[in-house]
Image (cartoon, rainbow, N blue to C red):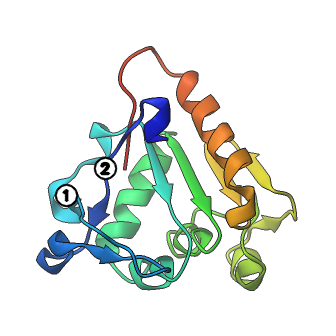
Amino acid sequence: LRNAGVSVILIGLSEDDRRGVKGKRGAVVPVDALIGEVREEDFDALLIPGGKGPAHLRHDPRVLEFTKAFDRDRKTIAAICHGPQILASADLLMGRTATSFFTVIPEVRKAGGLYANRPVVIDRNLITARKPGDIPQFSQALLEALDALPARERKIA
């Protein structure tokens, strides 16, 4: 996304995250802002990554409200792998088609979502993907959604 000229802002939960959040493979990435410092209206889209993070993030009401705000304003929300766990916890899947990592399928269905086993699923403003192998198609779908916006710098949370 950054290679395509998109401004990506990594958001953390607490002051401890300012030193960086640890990724699945051990890389530490510093956050750009904390959840209490950002507003949905400052962004064009929300990208929810996969891995173990969503299982933790979904318990923070600020994360759920931030996610719901994007949906209320019909802004793109892109979630990959375990990311749809946040969509389920934010009650955004009822009657909508989505995909996810296979272990998240029961949560998608329990939240009222219609599961589709495809690399990328687009349902209105939601873009979902199953796994890291789907990243090329997922990124393309997200870039196409951003390209449909008025020309200016793109900013993703």
Q: Residue at x 35, y 68 (%)?
A: 63
Q: Is residue 96 visible?
A: no
Label number found at residue 61: none
* In this rendering, position of residue 62 left or right of residue 17: right
Q: In the rendered structure, which amino acid carries the disc numbered 2?
A: Ile
Estimate the x, y position of residue 84 in percent, counting from the top left.
61, 69
Tell me the SS state at disc 1.
Answer: strand
Q: Residue at x 35, y 58 (%)?
A: 66
Report crowding for label 1: few under 14, some 14 to 19, many 20 or more residues within 10 A (C-alpha).
some
Establish if 134 lies above or below 115: above
On screen, 63 above or below 52? above
Tags 2 and 1 touching, CB below 8 Å: yes
The amino acid beneath tag 1 is: Ala
Outermost residue to the right: 117
Tell me the CA gap for discs 2 and 1: 7 Å
For the residue pair 95 and 28, the one nearer the viewer reads as 28
Identify the secondary structure beneath mark 2: loop
> Residue 52 in the image: x percent, y percent?
51, 83
- In depth, the one of 1 and 35 nearer the eye is 1
**Residue tagged 1:** 33
Write down the residue under mark 2: 9
